[in-house]
Each structure stands twice: as structure tokens, then as C-alpha cells.
Image: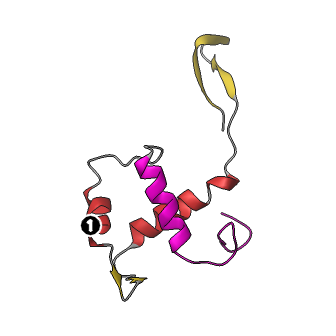
């Protein structure tokens, strides 16, 4: 959760910058959606414009994805750390995972 309300990088809360960013990421395969997520693809097919404006009906998953993509600028990477085998008390060098 962010301590402040969401805003696009250029300011404002418009939908278009997020849609363009999602489109670009889909085209460059930097945004992928598992094929079993039928509800997402159904919303994507229903997404349309009327009189030049996006119709905001049944678009919860698309909106959540748009917020996630536009919030990537706040993302921080985790460092790799060794996994400790608690039963033996040793570190496993072959298995690495993201630390919380």
C-alpha cells in the first residue's frame, strides 16, 4: 500500500498513459498474462471506447493491471540470499530464493 494516492508519472490520473504503457509492454512481451486467466481476456475483449473515451464498465482486472504497470517505477528488487536448512543448520548453495 502506498502512503499517497496514485498519480501518473506526468501527473494526473488519466487512463490513456497506462493503456499505452500496457500496449507497449504486451507488444514487446514484457507484460505477459497466463492463458488460463479467462476473466482477464474477457475484460480485455470487452474494453472499448465510445466517443473517444474508454468505457469504464466491468474493467476491474484491466484497471488493476494498469495500476500495477504504472506503479512499476516504485518497485524494488530483492537480493538473493542463501537458504538455510533449519533441520541441519547449514546453508544450501544450490538453492537460492528471493528474501522477503
Where in the figure is residue 2, as x and y percent of width and height?
A: 69, 65
Residue indicated by mark 1: 45
- Circle 1 residues within 10 Å: few <14, some 14–19, many ≥20: few
- Quadrant in which residue 51 is drawn: bottom left
Between residue 67 and residue 85, name the one nearer to us. Answer: 67
User: How many numbered marks appear?
Assistant: 1
- As drawn, the residue found furthest toward the right would be 3
Between residue 22 and residue 88, name the one nearer to us. Answer: 22
Residue at (69%, 54%) from the top-left corner? 74
**61 up-or-down from 89: above or below:** below
Write down the region rendered in magenta.
1-27
Between residue 70 and residue 58, name the one nearer to us. Answer: 70
Where in the figure is residue 45, as x and y percent of width and height?
A: 26, 67
**4 up-or-down from 87: above or below:** below
Q: Is residue 27 left or right of residue 43?
A: right
Q: Is residue 5 left or right of residue 58?
A: right
Q: Give the colour scheme of this rendering.
A: secondary structure
Where in the figure is residue 52, as x and y percent of width and height?
A: 40, 84
Where in the figure is residue 19, as x and y percent of width and height?
A: 47, 66
**78 up-or-down from 10: above or below:** above
Amino acid at each position: 500500500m502506498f502512503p499517497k494516492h496514485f498519480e501518473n508519472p506526468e501527473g494526473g490520473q488519466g487512463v490513456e498513459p497506462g493503456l499505452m504503457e500496457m500496449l507497449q509492454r504486451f507488444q514487446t512481451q514484457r507484460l505477459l498474462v497466463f492463458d488460463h486467466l479467462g476473466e482477464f481476456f474477457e475484460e480485455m475483449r470487452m474494453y472499448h471506447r465510445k466517443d473517444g473515451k474508454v468505457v469504464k464498465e466491468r474493467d476491474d482486472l484491466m484497471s488493476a493491471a494498469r495500476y500495477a504497470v504504472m506503479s512499476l517505477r516504485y518497485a524494488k528488487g530483492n537480493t538473493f540470499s542463501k537458504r538455510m536448512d533449519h533441520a541441519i543448520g547449514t546453508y544450501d548453495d544450490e538453492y537460492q530464493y528471493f528474501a522477503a
